[in-house]
Image (cartoon, rainbow, N blue to C red):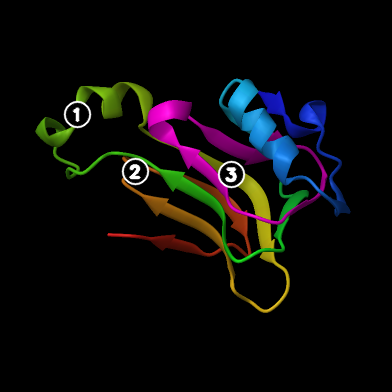
Amino acid sequence: MSNVLQFGAKGDGTTDDTDAILHTLKDGDGVLEFPRGDYLITRTIEIPLAQASRTAITGFGGVAKVIMAGEGPAFHLVGTHGGTAHPPSFKPDVWTAQRLPTVQNIEVQGKGDGSADGFRIEGLMQPTFEEIGRASCRERV
């Protein structure tokens, strides 16, 4: 797991942790790990699964919170799956590198005028969300 604190995030609720989280995503192992803390972000953390490969976002038992101070979703998970749940519609690259993105044990909160969302997902195969606090999720079809 790639602990976001080890990539420069502060988790103090006032420091903008956006760049540190993006750095974790780029140079980490595919698991964004958020220990206890309040992580302020000011723009969407986009995760293109075709480049990032299998990815997970995880907190520790709900004690980690991401505060989205900008507009739009806190996290945007983007895949290239255009098929259905029927196995013959799976493309090989989607099956091997993009399936089952997982988000668990984390709270996402909008800050400001209410224009922030928790998660936006599109083109994903078998996304899994568990124990998410206050988050909203919009799927683009």
Gap in Å between the C-alphas at discs 3 and 2?
16 Å
Tag 3 residue: 104
Circle nearer the N terminus (2, 1)? 1
Residue at the image point whose x is 72% and y is 50% from the top = 62
In screen coordinates, is 30 left or right of 8?
Answer: left
- Residue appearing at x 61%, y 31% in the figure: 25
Residue 23 x %, y %: 68, 31
Q: Residue 28: tell me if it is visible.
A: no
Region of the chain picked out in magenta, as a range: 33-59
Residue receiving disc 2: 124
Q: Residue furthest bottom?
A: 113
For residue 97, what is the image quadrant?
top left
Between discs 1 and 3, the one toward the N terminus: 1
The image shows residue 90, relative to residue 84, as above or below, that is above
Question: What is the secondary structure assignment of the residue under circle 2?
Answer: loop
Q: Amino acid at mark 3?
A: Gln
The image quarter containing residue 117 is bottom right
Q: Is residue 102 magenta?
A: no
Quadrant that contains the C terminus: bottom left
C-alpha separation, residue under disc 2 versus residue under disc 1: 12 Å
Question: Would residue 56 be found to the left or right of residue 139 on screen?
Answer: right
Q: What residue is disc 1 on?
A: 91
Amino acid found under the numbered disc labelled 2 = Leu
